[in-house]
Each structure stands twice: as C-alpha cells, then as structure tokens.
Amino acid sequence: MKNHILHIIIVLFIMSMFFSCRPDRKSVLNLQHAEALMEQHPDSALILLNKITPNSLSTEDYARYCLLITQARDKNGLPLTSDSLISVAVEYYNDKKDLAIKAKTYFYAGRINQDMQNTKQAMEYLLKAADFAEDGKDSRLQYLIYYCLGNLYLNESLYDSALKMYQQAFYYSRLQNNKDYMVYALRNVAFTYSGKGDNRNALIYYFKALNILPKSDTATLVTLLNEIGGRYNDLGDYSHALQIVNRAINIDFDSSKLLYSYFVKADIYFNTHQFDSASYYYNKTIRSLDFYTKTDSYNKLSKVERLRGNKDKSLLYNDIYLQCRDSLEKQLHSEMVIKMQNIYQHKKSVEKIQYLTLEKNQQRMILYLISAISVSVLLFLASILLLYRSRKERQTRELESVVQQEKEEAQIAKTRLQESELIRIKKEKILLEKEMELRSDFFNRLNNLTFPFLSSNQNKNATIRLTDDDWDSIVKNTDAAFNHFSTRLIKAFPDLKRDEILFCCLIKMKLGLGTLSSVYSLSKDAISKRKERIKKNKMKIEDGRSLDQFLTDF
C-alpha cells in the first residue's frame, strides 16, 4: 500500500513538473507580435514585452526575449544600465550560424556597454557586430554600428579612427537614402575635424550636411549653424561667424539653443574686443540650464570686466565662476559614485540572472531524470540527492567568487576615488595660486594708483607723511584684495594694536625697508627689530618664517 501511494506521488510530481515547464502560449504570441512591431512601433512592442513572463519561455524564446526587450528599451530612449539580459542573448546566439541575429545581438551588447561608459567592452562588441554584419543586407544596422563606433573613438580623442567610422556610417546611410542618418554622419565628420583643429575641412562637411538637411528639421539646423559659427570664430573670420550665428538666433527654435547661440555670439564679440557687446550676451547665457555653459559664461565675464577695467566686477564674477566650478566638480564626483553603485548593482543582477538560469536548467534536468528512472524510486531519490549536493557545492564556489570579486571591485573603486580626490586637490591648488596672483596684481595696481608716492624712487630718503584718510584707504585696499585682511588679523591675533595692524598692512603691500623707514622716521635696523618684536611677542610665530613671509601667506 505504501509503495502504491509512493508511486502515485511520483507520477503527480512528474506531471506537475511537466506542466510547469510548458511554455506559456500567450507569452510566445506576445513575443512574436512584439518582434513584428519593433521597427515601426517600438513603444507598442515594449508594452507587449512587459506583459511576458520570462520564466515561462523556452531557452530559445527567452534569448529572443532578452534581445527584443533590450532593443525596445533602446528605441524608446530608455537608459541602458545593465547588460544582464543581453548577455543571455549573446551567450545563446554566439554558437548559432545566423550572422544577422548575431550582428544585432552584439550591437545591442555594445550599446549597453557604451551607455554604461565601459568603452573597451563596448568597442569589442561593436567590432564583432561589424564583422558579422559585413556580408548582411541590413544597411541600417551597419550604419548604427559604425556611428556608435565613431562616437566611442571620438570620446577617446582618436580622431583618425573616428573619421573612418563616421565615413563608413555615411556610406551606409546613402545606401538607405536616409537623409537624417546622412546629416548625423556628416555633422560628426565635421565635428571630428574640428577636434583635430582642421576647421576648414570641418566647414566643408558642415555645409554638406546643411545641403542635405530637410527644411522641417529646424532643431538640427540651429545646432549646425551654431557649430559653423564657432568654426568661423576659431578661424578668425568673425564677420561670417556673426552672420551665421545671427541666422541661428533668428530661427529662435527653443530657449536652450538660443542661449547657446548667444554664447557663441558673445565669444565672437570677445575675440573682436567688443567687450560691451560680449558682456551683454554673456549676461544672457549665465541663465543657461546647461551648467557647463553657465560656468564658462561667468569665467568669460570675469575676463571681460578685467579687460574693461572693472576690477571689482571681475573679482565678483571670478568668485561666482569658482563656486560654479566647484559645484560642477561635486556633481561629476557624485555621478562617478552613482556609476560605481550602478556597476555594483549590475554585477549583482548578473549573478542573480545566472543563478535563475542555472536553477531553470536544473529543473529541466530533474524532469528528464525523473522520466528516465521513474521505474526505480531509490535511483530517483539517489539522483536528486546527488544534484542537490552538486548545487550546494556550486553555490558555495559561486559565493566565494562573488565575495572575492566584490572585494576587488571595492578596492578598485577606492583607488579611483583617491585618484579623483588627488586630481581635485591639485586643480584647487592651481586655481588658488592663480586667484592669489590675480589678487596680488589687483592690489599692487590699486596701491600704485592710490599711493604713487609710496613706490616712487624720489621719496626714497624723504619723510613720508600719511594722513588718517591715507591709513583708512590702505586698510580698505588690503581688505578688499585679501578677504578682509585686517579683520582676520585682529581675530587671529587679538594682542595687536591698531598701529601694529597698520604696520602689517604696509608689509602686505610689500614695501621695502627704505619706504617703511621714511613712513615711520626710523632707521632700517629699527624697522627690522619692530618686525621681529611683533612676530615673536604679539603673534607668537615660531615656524622659522619672517613676518613678511607669514603675512604674504596669511
């Protein structure tokens, strides 16, 4: 009786396994329908694919599903942040003879890695896709492959390689007679020549793109005109540059492109020393939502105001520029951290997919095994136990591998963050040094204008009388140029008296012993002793620096 019940349980188990592993007919139909809609209606295709239950598909259909949903997401402009699905398709189709499907699979694997900024892996996949597509008839896919390769080479500043790829892309766009593709390819050829510094060849290809561009595509027209204006500006042909940019402004497609047109126009006026006009347009572009344009605009405004003689405005704009630049660097740092987190999550999702795929394969193996040895319950149980132990050992090895890989990735991430921090500190140091040079230059010029007699050789041995107004101006100039110098000095060294603060302001002006002697009617030796007395008794400076050196750095 017990054996009879056991046999019934085994038969029911086999039947449940069989029906649970049957493909869902509705999911297969949705898969076929989505593939038919993909080119013309990718949004509808994505809706159908999202209704599919992947676990219900066969191995072949699941590989096709992974390829199609990746393709649908790319066509709908959705971010591609994980290659876990396309990896399934790559593994499945890699050994198949269908070159067309292999080319498409490797292309989308390359696209995902391109979006994930994994440049090396993206290039490998796209170059394989190009090989598989070489004998095919899908000129659209061939265009996309070479266009993406061109973008990768351009981002790495490999201009000659990028040119070859974009020229190949243009060739395949002509085969399709697709004007949009032709314009994009020609525009990127021009952009690449510009990157090489060959602006004349760049202009040739920009005008080729303009000749092909459909009249209805005003957005691309504005972009091309702005870039053409920039190239004429680089060549020093400012009249043509201004003419082209004004044409872009007159189209007035949208506010973001209009602000970029203003930025190009401001650069033209800056290069032609029309600083009032340059200031007018830079003041427009600081409202740009593009943070790079905004930051560069403040930098240029600082230079314009300095050349116009407005030192205070120049310093103000320079301070805002530094703040924007710091914010931009923090944003880039945050994006890098997010990228590292995405990579980590991507690795975890890959492991999960691999585990689920392995588990699904094991279920099929169990089904076949049970069907083959259903006549012997003992053999069946022994086989299940063997598979269970094998799976546990495999899981243990995989877990150890994952832990080791995570440790290595964490160390790599830590190293990259440290390198990024060192680069940031170095850049800040350089910018601080440049800022101090600018402040010192401004301070010296201001003092030379305000107190020309302090630097005059004619008064070298004569007594110099400074009025109260003169002393007040000296303090104001020092505070304006060096971030409230006197206030910080009083706060740091409360024992200093007012006449000692004024003495320190004169030292900050880098006046020689002779001039100081003339101001205070003291010998040079007495001036030196006073410096030493203030340094040791009032400021307690014991690091070996002189008072002059300390105040220069303060």
Image (cartoon, rainbow, N blue to C red):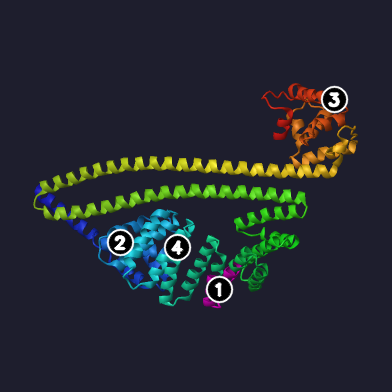
Residue 58 visible to an observer of this rendering: no
Q: Main secondary structure of the magenta part?
A: helix
Residue type of the residue flagged with mark 4: Gly
Q: What number is the disc on residue 147?
A: none
> Which quadrant of the structure image shows residue 78?
bottom left
Up-down relation of residue 322 to residue 186 (above or below): above
- Report the front residue among 145 and 68: 145
In this rendering, position of residue 216 left or right of residue 283: left
Alpha-carbon span between mark 1 and mark 4: 20 Å
Between the residue at mark 2 and the residue at mark 1, the CA separation in whole angstroms equals: 44 Å
Q: Helix, strand or loop at disc 2?
A: helix
Q: Residues within 10 Å of mark 1 (few under 14, many from 20)?
A: some
Q: Is residue 495 magenta?
A: no
Check disc 4 and report the residue beneath it. 150
Quadrant showing the C terminus: top right
Question: Which residue is identified by label 3?
Answer: 523
Q: Which residue is mark 2?
A: 63
- Vertical placement of residue 160 versus 404, above or below: below
What amino acid is found at the position of numbered circle 1 in the picture? Phe
Q: Which residue is mark 1?
A: 207
Query: Separation of disc 3 and disc 4 at Cα?
Result: 73 Å
Q: CA distance from mark 2 to mark 3?
A: 92 Å
What is the span of residues highlighted in magenta in the rendered image? 204-226
What is the distance, in whole Å, between disc 3 and disc 1 at their CAs?
A: 75 Å
What's the residue type where badge 3 is placed? Answer: Ser
